[in-house]
Image (cartoon, grey):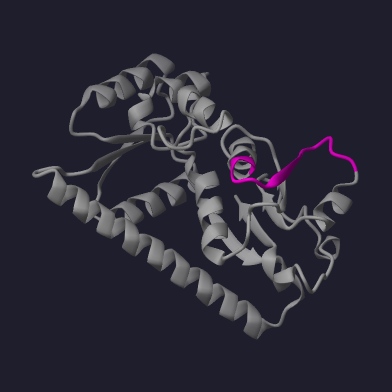
Amino acid sequence: MEINFPLSLLHSSSKQKNMEGCCLVLTLQKILLTLSQEVKKLKVQNSGLIPQLAIVQVGAREDSNVYVKMKLKAAKNIGIIAKHIVLPSSTNEIELLGILSHLNLDPHVHGVIVQMPLDCVNSINSNLITDSVFPNKDVDGLNSRNQGKVAVGDLATGFLPCTPSGCLELVKRSGTKIEGSHTVVIGRSRIVGTPVSELFKWHNATVTTCHSKTKNLDEVVANADILVVAIGQPNLIKGEWIKKRSSCDRLRYNFYSW
């Protein structure tokens, strides 16, 4: 889940925060409307096509339940059929691979998401699982082939990782100039941190990637034009780290993902 707000909100009034929140809601509504129109156009151009997404979830982590519910709702809102496949926590690697193989070969399924992390009592290689999803159905962008394309700057022929791509889209729609900015990304995970850094780099930002071994994190953050926090540790970034600079306050955006 991504929440977007200007860093200036750390120093702003409740009224200003409400205004920024309203702007974000309007932006998200515009994105949903655009996607809905694109899906309708796709159906017209391909007579009889019914776009279908399969979401595979192992176990029942509470946070995963929330995320899947949001994905199902979003898919419904834009006219895509979403099928939620829930597997027990006792599922083993071979069984999960079998399910994914079936979805890969099903011509009626156009996209596959494996909800991470896997809530399983058995040892399952998550990299093997994400790589088993066909690249042309890997709408989460986690297959190594799609990740490799992002790494070399090929952003047009594969699926982009969803959360990093969402962060980038919100920054673009905010009017913030990415080219030439100093973008600080905190976190280097395979799912969010690393691909966020790559995407902003290929949009001509100068990117600094921070992690648990980064020294003087507060100083790095203070110099950020765009800040992306992609870690599971709440309250890591302190308000006093963000320096007020009148020429930059409205241009610096912070994305928290948890």
Q: Is residue 160 left or right of residue 35?
A: right
The residue at the point 16 percent across, 44 percent down is 50
Q: Position of residue 214 (x, y in %)?
A: 84, 39
Q: Is residue 57 visible?
A: no
**Numbered disc total:** 0
Q: Residue at x 38, y 50 (%)?
A: 71
Q: Depth check: give the residue in front, 168 or 239.
A: 168
- Name the side, left or right, on which 126 lies relative to 75: right
Above or below, 257 against 129 in this view is: below
Left or right position of 150 against 81: right
Hey, which residue is sitting farthest left in the picture? 48
The residue at the far top in this view is 94
Residue 24 x/y as whole percent:
52, 69
User: Is 196 in the magenta?
Assistant: no
Res 18 → quadrant:
bottom right
Give yes or no for residue 212 being in the magenta stretch. yes
Q: Is residue 186 visible?
A: yes
From the top left corner, tell me how far across and down residue 234 is, in percent: 71, 53
* Residue farthest to the bottom, as pictured: 15
Tell me what residue is drawn at x 43 percent, y 35 percent: 59
Which residue occupies the foreground of this view, 32 or 37?
Answer: 37
Which residue: 46% across, 28% down?
A: 146
What is the quadrant of residue 20 in the picture?
bottom right
Position of residue 180 relative to residue 57, above or below, is below
The spot of residue 119 in percent (x, y) is 49, 32
Q: Which residues are magenta?
A: 201-215
